[in-house]
Amino acid sequence: MSLYQQTYRRWQQDPESFWVEAAAELHWDAPFHTAHQGDRWFLGGHINTCYNALDRHVENGRAEQTALIYDSPLDQKLQKFSYAELLIKVAGLAGKLRELGVGKGDRVLIYMPMVPETLMAMLACARLGAIHSVVFGGFASQELAARIQDAQPKLILTASCGLEPKGTVEYQPLLERALLHQADIPIMVLERPQCSWDFRAGQHRWSEGQPVACVPTLATDPLYILYTSGTTGIPKGIVRDHGGHSVALKWSMQHIYNIRPGEVFWAASDMGWAVGHSYIVYGPLLHGCTTVLFEGKPVGTPDAGEFWRVIEEHRVVSLFTAPTAFRAIKREDPEGTFLNPRDLSHFRALFLAGERLDPDTYHWARQLLQKPVVDHWWQTETGWPVASTCLGLGEEPKQPGSPGKTVPGYRVEILDEQGQRLPAGREGAVVLKLPLPPGNSPTLWNQDEKYHQVYLSQFPGYYNTGDGGYLAEDGHLFIMGRLDDVIIVAGHNLSTGSLEEALAGHPAVAECAVFAIQDDFKGQLPMGMVVLKTGQQDTPQLHQELVQRVRDEVGAIACLKQVLVVQRLPKTRSGKILRAALRKLADGVEFPIPPTIEDAGVIEELRDQLRPYRRR
Ligand code: COA
Ligand code: AMP
């Protein structure tokens, strides 16, 4: 039996003691009295994530080790912080937050770019027992406003701008628009040299205060809220706790990613996404690694050799990014000429997740790097991988097209619509048997009932991932895509509901639908379909305005560039838009006309209109 099989079996036989053993790797201020109850882990235990990510290492011989490397080709900056230096910064920042009135349980919204202060702010909140909610800097006002509305922060931390290859993205207008009805929330601003901030009353310059020690927190206390896209325009606030989250991430660093404390790990993502939370900030630091914070792109900053430079220069042993990043490098440098002069002998593995890894890109990367390329699958809600090739348990990737086998801690099953288990090879809903392991979101912020309704109600006893797929005879999982209206653009999860809200706000639009079309580069792209109000004209200017609205409200990251004006949308008799039918029409997939459709004629009309946009 392989080490992976032995470990999986050990977990299966006694999940509780499996995780109790993993918990012993961390510092507990007071032990837990109950390892597991319902959807909670380590009840009664006292543990502070910031203590475990910083203080513990400083006290145990890692004070001088580099904790953070900030490498920004966009800002032409390279900065390194040892664990001791990072601790001083974080303790001082926590002191400042306390001065500004932030205490345990308060929410702090962080709308910031890829700079060290963002990571410091997250850890400073953890230190105080405050709950951070990071909003990706690429989101515009509507998305930001929805998150502020839900999290009700005591303080907002922001910067004057983000840096993109095309120039600066000024945050002040975006934030002020989002705050129209809540202008009284205090703000602390990091002014970057590229862009100034017009300070108003209640707005503070970034500074540090008197250093403070870690506040005792329960393992079950919330560490952060991270909003993810649902099928509606209202984002879902995923909640992560201090205890289970730390235990799961530390375990994953060793057993999935095969990283040893002291090594350099790089997740080329953004701190606004789950990947950034788990594998730029918390995972590597909890494990005593050096983490790389990269403010740049895989191509164009300045070229397709940038990832190889960072890996060589900082002695990165493993890189984690989205397949789109590698498709971008492949497109610009198919022969891998930028890699030739680089010494990557220390590099051990490439991890890809966030969207489907197409076999072409897998083979290209494998061939070029001559190192394992690991496709793995998880979601914001789980916080760490559900399926992977566990390199730390002696496995090697064997099946291109599959994100590997189920990770110990999870039991993946495939169900049909009636909730019956399907045999190997049959496609259905991918679900996780309850209870979920530590680190998974036990609820939605302020919305226990919605959590139940979205994830637990369809298949009692299971968590519904929203993905479709199948399990092969040998245990490899295959993910075929979302079963709901969430779309994944370049590894970014977007809600069609938000995009529709933005389009529907245009005065000429009577109703609209947004759905995904397949794209060879970004995986999926959103397409808008609008029905105009009587008397409104379909003009190039209208198209421009609609595209601009989405950029202004949701953000350029949505990449909505196509809008089709149609006479009517396919709907059920009760008025529900049949988005699944639109998706299939756009992809050129044959499907039976839904029996609930109001007027089947619309399908043929739209099939013709969508034909030019089809990939196949
Ligand atoms: N702040 C503000 N704007 C942002 C932004 C941010 N943090 N991130 C992206 N944008 C903007 C971009 O400037 C671009 O604007 P434009 O339409 O005016 O050109 C738009 O959003 C789309 O961005 P992006 O998806 O990054 O597309 P791109 O064509 O500029 O770059 C890649 C292509 C491949 C370089 C990029 O998609 C990439 O790095 N993908 C990897 C994805 C990833 O890391 N996912 C994280 C999950 S692991
Ligand atoms: P997010 O919550 O943004 O991380 O998105 C999670 C979703 O991305 C999953 O539910 C999947 O639909 C998709 N996804 C993530 N990783 C993979 C992968 N390795 N292969 C296919 N789809 C993936």
Image (tube, rainbow, N blue to C red):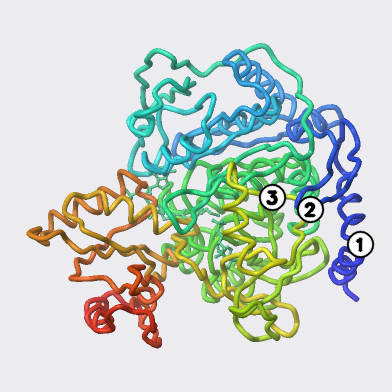
Q: Residue 320 appears at what percent x and percent y?
A: 62, 55
Q: Residue at x 48, y 16 (%)?
A: 205
Q: Quadrant of the C terminus?
A: bottom left
Q: Earlier in the sequence, mark 3 or mark 1?
A: 1
The amino acid marked with disc number 2 is Gly
- The residue located at (53%, 64%) in the rendering is 355
- Who comes first in sequence, dot 2 or dot 3? 2
* Residue 435 % position (x, y): 77, 59
Mark drawn on residue 43: none
Residue annotated with mark 3: 442
Q: In the image, what residue type sits under mark 1?
A: Asp
- 203 left or right, relative to 130: left
User: In this view of the protein, can residue 390 be seen by the observer?
Assistant: no
Residue 419, how many percent across, how many down?
Answer: 65, 77
For the residues marked 2 and 3, what is the alpha-carbon distance in whole angstroms?
9 Å
**Circle 1 Cα neighbour tier, 10 Å, few/some/many (<14 / 14–19 / ≥20):** few
Q: Nearer the viewer, mark 3 or mark 1?
A: 3
User: In this image, 566 relative to 497: left or right?
Assistant: left
